[in-house]
Amino acid sequence: MDYLAATAEKKYLMYISQNYSYAILRPLQQEILAHGGEVKWFLEGDEVNPDFLHQEEQRLMSLNDVKEWQPDIVYLPGNIVPNFIPGKKVKVFHGFNSGKRVNNGLDNHFKIRDCFDLYCTQGPSTTTTFIELAQKHGYFQVKETGWPTLDPYFSEIENNPYEDKQDPRKTLLICSTFSRRISLAPKLYEQIKAFSEQGKWRILMQFHPKMPSELVAQYKALQNENLTFVETDNVLPLLKAADVMLCDTSSILLMFILQRKPVVTFCNQNPGEHLVDITDADKIEQAIDYALTEPDELMAKIEHFCQQLHPYQDGLSSQRVLAASNELLLTNPALKPKPRNFIRNLKMRKKLNYWRW
């Protein structure tokens, strides 16, 4: 059966709670609309800015509106969706598995929160574990599709605002996660300040949206002709504009490395051979210089890693996610009922101030 053709006249809800989710879901929205489906957005909480919605995008203003609209499929980059939202719940992830751990030692990327009917995985390195978890729990399916977010990544971006073809210097992109324990931002300020003053590279900086405001202000103050601090809801053009990245354990480094470009990390929690990991702040500059030479051994290890992480470079991951979602909807496989999680859903009702049953 052509599950893409089955999109026509069906309803798809984009359920988001962070600004970066717009860019994650828009390639999927484009695919749905191209196949005759209907898309609407629901914005949960105050950390997502409605001003980022495009004029033609339709927003459902309340949970009552969502229930009355009755979506067939609900897509989430986030981790939690209340069970009173109608439709099949599909997890599309808000990033790659960066190796961050939760307190009990388990990998946070594989934490099952009993919310989803389908996990659309990005590549072999995560698919295997999710299939094992599906067999263990029995109430969700897994399909390896690639990540829809990256579909535009494998084509040229016209008029990229972060490129400067008149500047002959290499471009260094510095990104950091928000957790103070693993963030490079509090630890490498003096080194980055020195980089911004010496002008050896053209520097772009971008932080996780949850980064403490005092750190953001501190780094914004460094801006000059050598360093630009960027705030954006779409990091893809930013990633494409750089030659090398300096990062910590943020999952954004995995998006960057899929370009087959080198990444220097500072005290990465899960350093692999595909990374140039440094634990001595005074050796950061030397490591960046080394990475920019793109040594053959390093580039071969990067290629092997990318094949496991996200082997798809055809820009068709949105099609695969949509087809897998429609297949789930139409075949309605016999899965175990999901745990009710009464306490969690009560908390969600309180958070969303929604008490209709």
Image (cartoon, grey):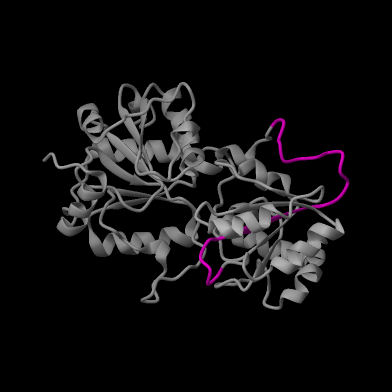
Q: Quadrant of the C terminus?
A: top left
Q: Is 253 situated left or right of 226 in this image?
A: left
Q: Residue at x 25, y 44 (%)?
A: 352
Does residue 17 appear in the picture of this structure?
A: yes
Q: Quadrant of residue 233?
A: top right
Figure check: 128 above or below 116: below
Q: Is residue 253 visible?
A: no
Name the quarter where the N terminus is drawn. top left
Relative to 55, is 188 on the left or the right? right
For the point 15% across and 56% down, the residue is 342
Give the x, y percent position of residue 30: 48, 28
Query: In screen coordinates, is 268 left or right of 196?
Result: left
Q: Classify 317 as above or below 113.
A: above
Q: Position of residue 79 (x, y in %)?
A: 35, 53
Q: Which residue is at a point 44% across and 34% down the rendered structure image? A: 50
Residue 117 or residue 356, whichever sits in front:
356
Judge by depth and name the residue closer to the eye, 215 or 170: 215
Which residues are the magenta region?
158-182
Nearer to me, 169 or 115? 169
User: Percent x, y for residue 257?
Assistant: 64, 56
